[in-house]
Image (cartoon, coloured by chain):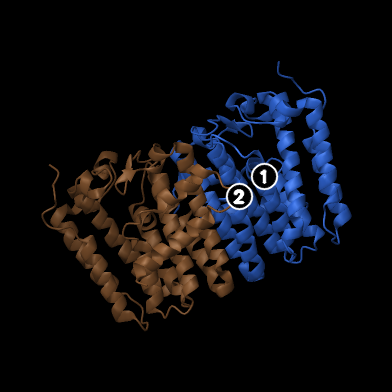
Chain colours: A brown, B blue
Amino acid sequence: MDMHKRINAAVARAVALGQTGKAPSQLSTALGYATTPGGARIRPTILMSVALACGDDRPELSDAAAAALELIHCASLVHDDLPCFDDADLRRGKPSVHRAYSEPLAVLTGDSLIVLAFEVLARAAPHAPDRAMQLVLTLARQTGMPNGICAGQGWESEARIDLSAYHQSKTGALFIAATQMGAVAAGQEAEPWHELGARIGEAFQVADDLRDALYDIETLGKPAGQDDLHGRPNAVASLGVDGAIRRLKDILSGAIASIPSCPGEAKLAEMVRLQAERLTPVVEPVQAKA
Amino acid sequence: MDMHKRINAAVARAVALGQTGKAPSQLSTALGYATTPGGARIRPTILMSVALACGDDRPELSDAAAAALELIHCASLVHDDLPCFDDADLRRGKPSVHRAYSEPLAVLTGDSLIVLAFEVLARAAPHAPDRAMQLVLTLARQTGMPNGICAGQGWESEARIDLSAYHQSKTGALFIAATQMGAVAAGQEAEPWHELGARIGEAFQVADDLRDALYDIETLGKPAGQDDLHGRPNAVASLGVDGAIRRLKDILSGAIASIPSCPGEAKLAEMVRLQAERLTPVVEPVQAKA
């Protein structure tokens, strides 16, 4: 099975756990709605690539880790789209969860997906209890407070933002989770994989700033120009478009250089290069703004 | 240390984990605000009572379990109070989190507390990895979909409510978590403790219906008459006040009878009796409505 199919199958199995038996039907279908279609599944793809590079000797655990990480990512999208945050009508080209269902169901969908992520890891524990517990800990740290994506969103409510902490937690955290969880699922230490995740996260942030500044709503499948609208800091504002693209390439070179020594190192470097191409906007965007 | 102090200390240590280092300050203080003052801490008290009745041979794990359960309970209160659910201005006699901070910070506070609950359990894993993983699984099941408190709230968005599933998940779930997690933390099987938790939950639901119907806002520290207002089903509407009080006493007798054989069985029965007295409304309420 190719990696994308393997990840989507793992996510589908995880979501199905929350939909069994006598469940309230709207919330049940909302869990599926919020997690499909999957898009690029970038974070679990990185996780799985690292796990494979490290030998992937407990594939059930890698599957669980990939699904758990993607569920947390989907939960964050559902909550970020809520009226009190981005108030986004669209996500991945279809109505956001609170528009398609309701605001209460969107809050509950996010909550349920967060809980399900940890349940999936605990269920995979018999395959390697120590690794599973380390996965719970790693995912929790990169999701909650004080350094996870919740903290990242929390910074947006502060009068004075610590920009480095903000970016590291808002965008970097789940990429750090991706590289560390991939390593842990395959029996390796988490710490040496921190830098790769942080650098990929940084690259993703710059790429997101570029996309937000350059592309229109049809290309993005979500409202464009959100950073500008909400007065959020971004790389294009500080470096210009060309400067931001150069910065993106530098970060990705550094990311490749930071890959720890492992059996599948060369293939992993190739994967990062592939993600880099995906991330870098084409020079003439479909429709530049202003 | 008495049990109440032990629980509050465990909750405070858990919350402090989310507030260390460079955290956004408002979200950081909101975590403390949402978890104090603690009130009766009924769920962790039941959990700790069961752990003690079973020997409490890993006190660090019982502490972690009690804190994790209370964090989930507090998270559910913060999200339930949101404008899109109960729109409650008050909680435990002070402004609800979204009133004191903001709606975005209330969503993030709930999310962060959920994540922190699982982190606390994972951090306690070295004291007994198998038990810790079982605690993660038990807590996740009673919190998320399809049977946890998220499912309970989810039922309120359905046109046709399965009343038994609704009550079991909305109120029963965290009491089932309390008895099961207490047993697991002390090295016992979870399953035999299901009935005690379910019965206590049922009693609590009837008691809550009674309080909601009988008491005024000053006594409750939150808006009264919410069930009536939101057209939610309740025991007072179907049985009347006297009938509901009789039902409450019957359920609690059944709860005591269901306690599995364990070293501290007699003391545990005494604790349930004590909770029963606390739950049963006085016959002449401070100020009856209508």
For the residue labelled by badge 2, is the local secondary structure a helix, a strand or a loop?
loop
Q: Is residue A198 above or below residue B100?
A: below
Residue furthest to the bottom in view is: A263
Q: Where is residue B284 drawn, in percent x and y?
A: 81, 22
Q: Where is residue A50 drawn, in percent x and y?
A: 38, 73
Q: Amino acid at mark 2?
A: Asn
Q: Residues within 10 Å of mark 1 (few under 14, many from 20)?
A: many
Q: Where is residue B208 drawn, in percent x and y?
A: 70, 34
Q: Which residue position is annotated with label 1?
A: B168
Residue furthest to the left in view is: A284
Q: Which residue position is annotated with label 2?
A: B147
Question: Toward which corner of the image does residue A276 lie, by quadrant?
Answer: bottom left
Residues under numbered marks 2 and 1 in contact, where contact means CB atoms less than 8 Å apart: yes
Residue furthest to the top in view is: B290
Q: Which chain's residue wears label 1?
A: B
Q: Amino acid at mark 1?
A: Gln
For the residue labelled by badge 1, is the local secondary structure a helix, a strand or a loop?
helix
Q: Residues within 10 Å of mark 2 (few under 14, many from 20)?
A: many
Q: Where is residue A155 drawn, in percent x and y?
A: 40, 47
Q: Which chain's residue wears label 2?
A: B
**Mark closest to the chain's N terminus, 2 or 1:** 2
The reply to whether residue A75 is visible in this rendering is yes
Please report the residue visible at 50 percent of the width from the left and 56 percent of the height from the top: A16
Q: Is residue A233 above or below residue A261?
A: above
